[in-house]
Amino acid sequence: MENNVLLEVKNLKKCFDVGGRKVLTAVDNVSFYVRKGETLGVVGESGCGKSTTGKTIMHLIPATSGQIIYDGQDITHMDRKEYLAFTRKAQMIFQDPYASLDSRMTAGDIIAEGMTIHGMYNAKERKERVYELLNTVGLNKEHASRFVHEFSGGQRQRIGIARALAIGPEFIVCDEPISALDVSIQAQVINLLLELQESHKLTYLFIAHDLSIVRHVSDRVAVMYLGAVVELAESNELYENQLHPYTRALLSAIPIADPQVTRAKQRILLEGDVPSPIDVGAGCKFAGRCSMCKQICHEEAPQLRDVGGGHYVACHMI
Ligand SMILES: Nc1ncnc2c1ncn2[C@@H]1O[C@H](COP(=O)(O)OP(=O)(O)O)[C@@H](O)[C@H]1O
Ligand code: SF4
Ligand SMILES: [Mg+2]
């Protein structure tokens, strides 16, 4: 393992009890690491376990099993004091800027909340810091006294970003930070996140279902399918030399601006629906939709392994 790793998850598993002795495995044996200062993108269709992975890392929900290591320390189990210390270093930006901010609070109170919890600064300094943060995210001090419901979606997401930045974190889980926003302002928020990464030396776990955005922001990308990471590689490598049948199908679905390239590129259609994550059997989770499927795929779950140069794939046929 490299020594510049900030976060590592090992065999992370999160199961939900969904009644009638049924178990939904939202995150199944996920392992990856994030280097200091890099962006690891996480992509996959809706319901594949991206948010659950992020929330489990952030301890918003408890892991069923596995290990979470942050800056060399095992943080899988933390007491209240340790958790508080962790939240000074790690923060999360949520997908839905409408649901994730309390509409009865002012923007200023939302941004200041973390500083108050951590006993940072006196009241006057906190106010100044709120103004500074509003400025950083492209809003201004007049916005501090306004209630959340008075803002547009894009402005709310900026408040969510200011809240995450307030206590000076080093690591941020960005959970689909632009998917609820109008296309016209998505680029602005992405650019803001990229600028902040540069100026604040941030490390991101960047979750998205849109592959083209992930490519744009990520150094490396992990592709998830039904709770498992099926492929992980450097961004360019993944886009130019994807190996897993699922990644290939996902990538072939991205529209390409150049019509000649589109014609040359064979589109692979995914057959069938994503199966239910409840009581999944042994074997490869992609087996039911995979054109390369063989007998062993139904019997044994393929393990994620390095096929060279940090390109990881979980497939029996590769
Ligand atoms: N609290 C919960 N209780 C039961 N099932 C859940 C819960 N949260 C998420 N799930 C299920 O876990 C799976 C993964 O969900 P999620 O992590 O939200 O996916 P994604 O973020 O990739 O869209 C889905 O099948 C979802 O329905
Ligand atoms: S392990 Fe088998 S079913 Fe799964 S992706 Fe590879 S070839 Fe397809
Ligand atoms: Mg999600």
Image (cartoon, rainbow, N blue to C red):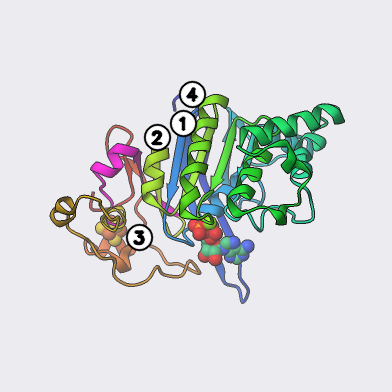
Kindly identify which residue carries mark 4.
Answer: 4
Q: Is the CB of mark 3 within 8 Å of ligand 2? A: yes
Q: Quadrant of the N terminus?
A: top left
Callout in the foreground (4, 1) = 1
Callout in the foreground (4, 3) = 4
At horizontal 54% and vertical 57% (from top left) the residue drawn is 180
Q: Earlier in the sequence, mark 2 or mark 3?
A: 2
Q: What element carries label 4?
A: loop
Instruction: Give the magenta part as a residue range.
Output: 228-246
Q: Earlier in the sequence, mark 1 or mark 3?
A: 1
At horizontal 85% and vertical 28% (from top left) the residue drawn is 124
Q: Nearer the viewer, residue 292 or 222?
A: 222
| Residue 38's disc number | 1
Q: Is residue 36 magenta?
A: no
Give neighbour class at mark 2: few <14, some 14-19, many 20+ (Cα, 10 Å): some
Q: Is mark 2 on a helix, strand or loop?
A: loop
From the viewer's perspective, tell me whether residue 83 is left or right of residue 227.
Answer: right
Contact (CB < 8 A) between labels 1 and 2?
A: yes
Kindly identify which residue carries mark 2.
Answer: 219
Callout in the foreground (4, 2) = 2
Callout in the foreground (2, 3) = 2
At horizontal 52% and vertical 43% (from top left) the residue drawn is 189
Q: Which residue lies furthest to the front in this view?
A: 142
Residue 59, x across and y down, in percent: 66, 46
Q: Gap between marks 1 and 3, in whole Å?
A: 30 Å
At horizontal 42% and vertical 67% (from top left) the residue drawn is 281
Q: Gap between marks 4 and 3, in whole Å?
A: 32 Å
Visible residue check, residue 25: no
Q: Is the CB of mark 4 within 8 Å of ligand 1? A: no
Q: What element carries label 3?
A: loop
Q: Is the CB of mark 1 within 8 Å of ligand 1? A: no
